[in-house]
Image: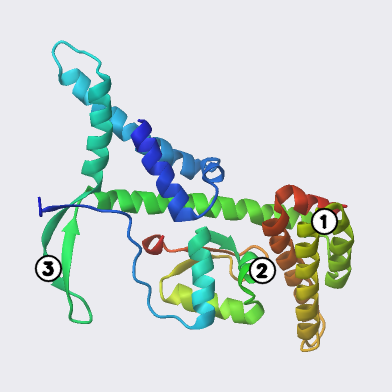
């Protein structure tokens, strides 16, 4: 029986992030996907700061980004690996 | 089928952190939920047709549900590998790896659909607003129609964002940057209200 193990859905280890990035990523991960300005409302990270943070998270492969050039339309979603 | 549907429902609830029923109203959420429910049905149908003569059995149906779910989640131990830190790590593979990919794909698409819905709602209600202090004052006035707790939360949020807006306005160069700042704060307050008072409350506060 050692050869088989019942597997629950385990969360993946996330690379270490600074405080802002961690706040943003945690929110996106909880919601799966969020409009950019909804993230601002939920975390208090906003403006250029938020855009940079999202770009950093995307570069690390933690989130995927749609239409980041237009903050009103942008949608940020968690990468499938971290769902 | 019930076991598969329950299992998929539990995954949607625990992974998305959102209302289970909201996820089911998106195409991908529904497809995922239904497809997981169909696995035990397929197993039972296969079992039914290999019987001779064909006979229905509630006991076999329950066993097919539990059995297929257990098989989907079972992993076989393949050996050990070393992590980047040099620690040994057990390697398990199984059908669940495939399910995990399918699950992540469907739940992500479902989450994006829900986010798009919220974005469209806020955009539809607020796209014509151009001045944040005026909008914030209007929201505070309309909040009079809410119950005491909601009223206080809404006013607190509007004040908090107005203070932050004024701080940032002092740092902007004017022109397009100022227009963008108004827009961003109007939408940010919109999303905050959606979370605080829901869809109906948002409509009341922004159109009243």
Q: Secondary structure at mark 2?
A: helix
**Mark 2 lies on residue:** A41
**Residue shown at 46%/68% (left/top)?**
A63
The quadrant in which residue A13 appears is bottom left
Q: Is residue A50 visible?
A: yes
Residue farthest to the top, as pictured: B53
Q: Position of residue B176 (x, y in %)?
A: 78, 78
**Mark 3 lies on residue:** B80
Q: Quadrant of the N terminus of chain B?
A: top left
Q: Is residue B161 left or right of residue A51?
A: right
**Mark 1 lies on residue:** B206
**Residue shown at 19%/19% (left/top)?**
B49
Q: Secondary structure at mark 3?
A: strand
B66 in relation to B13, above or below: above
Same chain for labels 1 and 3? Say yes or no: yes
Q: Is residue B38 left or right of residue B138?
A: left
- Check the residue under mark 1 and report the chain it is in: B
The quadrant in which residue A12 appears is bottom left
Same chain for labels 3 and 2? Say yes or no: no
B62 in relation to B169, above or below: above
**Residue shown at 40%/48% (left/top)?**
B11
Q: How many marks?
A: 3
Q: Position of residue B203 (x, y in %)?
A: 79, 50
The quadrant in which residue B175 appears is bottom right
Q: How far apart are the two marked residues, 3 and 2, measured between alpha carbons? A: 44 Å
Q: Position of residue A44 (x, y in %)?
A: 64, 75
Q: Secondary structure at mark 1?
A: helix
Same chain for labels 1 and 2? Say yes or no: no
């Amino acid at each position: 029986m050692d050869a088989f193990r019942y597997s629950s859905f385990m969360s993946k280890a996330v690379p270490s992030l600074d405080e802002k990035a961690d706040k943003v990523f945690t929110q996106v991960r909880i919601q799966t996907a969020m409009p950019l300005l909804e993230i601002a409302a939920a975390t208090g990270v906003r403006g250029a700061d938020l855009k940079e943070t999202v770009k950093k998270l995307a570069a690390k492969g933690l989130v995927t980004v749609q239409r980041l050039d237009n903050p009103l339309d942008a949608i940020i979603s968690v990468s499938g690996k971290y769902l | 089928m019930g076991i598969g549907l329950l299992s998929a429902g539990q995954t949607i609830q625990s992974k998305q952190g959102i209302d289970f029923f909201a996820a089911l109203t998106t195409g991908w959420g529904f497809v995922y939920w239904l497809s997981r429910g169909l696995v035990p049905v397929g197993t039972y149908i296969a079992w039914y047709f290999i019987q001779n003569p064909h006979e229905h059995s509630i006991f076999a149906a329950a066993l097919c549900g539990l059995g297929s779910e257990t098989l989907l989640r079972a992993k076989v131990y393949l050996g050990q590998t070393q992590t980047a830190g040099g620690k040994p790590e057990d390697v398990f593979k199984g059908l669940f790896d495939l399910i995990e990919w399918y699950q992540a794909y469907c739940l992500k698409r479902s989450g994006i659909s829900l986010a798009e819905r919220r974005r469209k709602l806020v955009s539809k209600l607020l796209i014509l607003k151009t001045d944040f202090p005026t909008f914030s004052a209007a929201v505070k006035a309309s909040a009079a129609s809410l119950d005491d707790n909601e009223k206080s939360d809404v006013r607190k949020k509007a004040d908090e964002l107005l203070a932050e807006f004024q701080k940032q306005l002092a740092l902007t160069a004017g022109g397009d940057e100022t227009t963008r700042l108004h827009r961003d704060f109007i939408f940010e307050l919109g999303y905050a209200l959606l979370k605080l008072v829901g869809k109906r409350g948002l409509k009341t506060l922004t159109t009243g």
